[in-house]
Amino acid sequence: MAPPRAVRPRLSGAASPGAPHAAAIDAFAHRHRLRGYEAAPWLAALAAYFLFPGYLPLVAQILATILFALSADLVLGYAGIVTLGQAAFFGAGAYTAGILAAHGWGEPITGLLAAAVAAAAIGFLSGLVILRSTGLALLMQTLVVAALLRETANKASAITGGDDGLQGMQVWPIFGRFEFGLFGRTAFFYCLAVLFLCWLALRRLVHSPFGRSLTGTRENVGRMHAIGAPVMRRRLTAYTISAAFAGISGALIAQTASFVGLDSLGLERSGTVLIMLIIGGVGRLYGAFIGVPLYMIAQDRFSSIDPVYWFFWIGLLMVLLVTFARGGILGLVDRLRSWGGGLR
Amino acid sequence: MPSALSAVFFIGFHGIAFAMVLYLISVGLSVTMGMMGFVNLAHGVFAMAGGYVMTRLMNQQGAPLPLALAAATVVVAVASLPIERVLYRRLYGGDELDQVLLTMGLVFMSGAAAQYLCGPLQQPLRLPPGLNGGVRLGFGEVPAYDALLIVCGAGLVTGLWLGIERSRFGAKIRAAVDNLRMAQSLGIDTSRLFSLTFALGSGLAALGGGLGASLITITPGYALDNLVYFLIVVAIGGLGNIRGPFLAALLVGIADSACKYWIPQFGAFFIYAMTMAILLWRPRGLFGRA
């Protein structure tokens, strides 16, 4: 589980003994305020639009995957549910949007909403059954839910296309005007806008009292039970919301690629999103913005340099990161900052 | 009726042979997860390495099967020692997510390395002539290699259980699983114990990977493709225990063999559903301690 993150007061400017405490309370009370650095990912995305016009499809993929990683961060980093089955909801959303678009309803935004509802329904129903468990049993059950869905999609080939994937998706232009073109401009802005709205919603959620009680269940379930918090209901709500966002992310990728394959429900997808999130840092809402681009750009670069053995280098990157930067990149940043603070 | 009976016999036989392989590979995982609390998703790598060493020795050097198997076991057990010391040790008692990242990194690296060294294709297993055919047994002819698997597996399992129950080393392992701090307080060198247990588990996995090369084919994707099966055996069997995984492996092996025979169109559906049901009924596995 992610370690508790204490709000670190700045000791240097403390005048009275009470001040550091007050500073901590102040920082905590204003935790929901937007800060300057929070603009950085959005500025970087816009910069990528102008600097790398040839890479827009990749950037759009990264943006959609960031949303997937954010959904995983809500269950893993905030609710403390270690899941290896997040792809269940990603795939459910992708197939919902894909099947709608292949059967004559290609309107993208209602497609996203339908995907969110379908994924949330699956999240709610499976969460109702599995969230009573903890530890390895819970991990295995999340994995099994995704595996069962994948087997179902594989067998229901009349609807899903089975092993060959779902083909023949016709995605209509957004608002009837902006068509998904070859250069991925529409896809880029579409993914960016959806990610931004979802990020705002998630940010609001984790800073709300609900978010605090989620953190509470992660840190100390016993105490949350003792103070009368409805732990199961909190976890189920978080799981359902997270499923909805994962579904939106799956639908985004399905709509921009006009294709859904069985791999969207696979263990590899659940695993890699977890890896990307851990690389960035878990339970911060910003790990996804660092880990996903890092992983996906590294994958793109390595696979163009070494098309056969690129995953060796990805693996090496992971081993080096965990050896030298525990707690992800943001964990490293935290440690550097507190180290710098200690010098002052 | 005889055909149905012989089908049951055949399924049981094949299932038990598969179970032996699953058990040999998974038992080390159960003990490392139970004793060191380490989520070792890379455990299949050791089984894969064992399979590669064995098939390469047999196919290229013409080594006999028993020698190649023994060499694979020893090579992998010894090679796992520095890996444990340098990479795993620093994460004991740490964050599970760091362990996931490390072990998945190792899975990726080993898969690419296997493909680089031995190519993307499955490694052929050339059995000595005596093991290629079948043997007549009870209701019909069964593959001779499966019979050998069951005999070897039964011998190894008995040896392992006796060793853990009767030997001083086994008693230390049980003590460390039961209560690590108490074991340390009694003066057991748990650091050394961890290394040896890890090497033992890796060696057994290599043995299982080598012996089972006919059932679980040796390809670069081995560690990732079969991870779910190993995890299911450990989760159903219960952590940190050596008997639970055996019964879990029997259950999974026979169920898998039966499903492939009777309802192949459902794939692994039944195994997943069974895992789900068992874990809902007993979250700590069939033999896990409360």
Image (cartoon, helix red, strand yellow):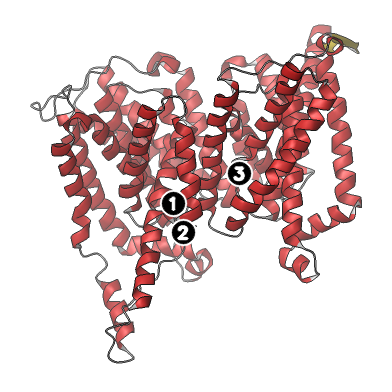
Closer to the camera, B1 or B106?
Answer: B106
Q: Residue B186 carries which label?
A: none
| Residue A328, percent from left and from top | 42, 54
For mark 2, name the chain. Answer: A
Judging from the image, mark 1 belongs to the subunit labelled A
In the displayed structure, does residue B224 sit left or right of residue A283?
A: right
* Tag 3 residue: B280
Q: Where is residue A172 in the image (x, y as percent from the top left)?
A: 16, 22
Instruction: Determine which of the numbered discs, if any, sits on residue A76 in the image.
Output: 1
Tell me the element at label 1: helix
Q: Do labels 2 and 1 share a chain?
A: yes
Contact (CB < 8 A) between labels 2 and 1? yes
The vertical placement of B145 against A148, above or below, is above
Q: Relative to residue A256, is residue B235 depicted above or below?
A: below
Q: Same chain for labels 2 and 3? Say yes or no.
A: no
Residue B220 seen from this side = no
Q: Measure the alpha-carbon separation of dots 2 and 3.
A: 26 Å
The three-letter amino acid code for the residue at tag 1 is Leu
Disc 2 crowd, CA 10 A, few/some/many (<14, 14-19, 20+): many
In what element is the residue under mark 3? helix
Q: Observer-nearest residue: A102 or A77? A: A77
Q: Quadrant of residue B45?
A: top right
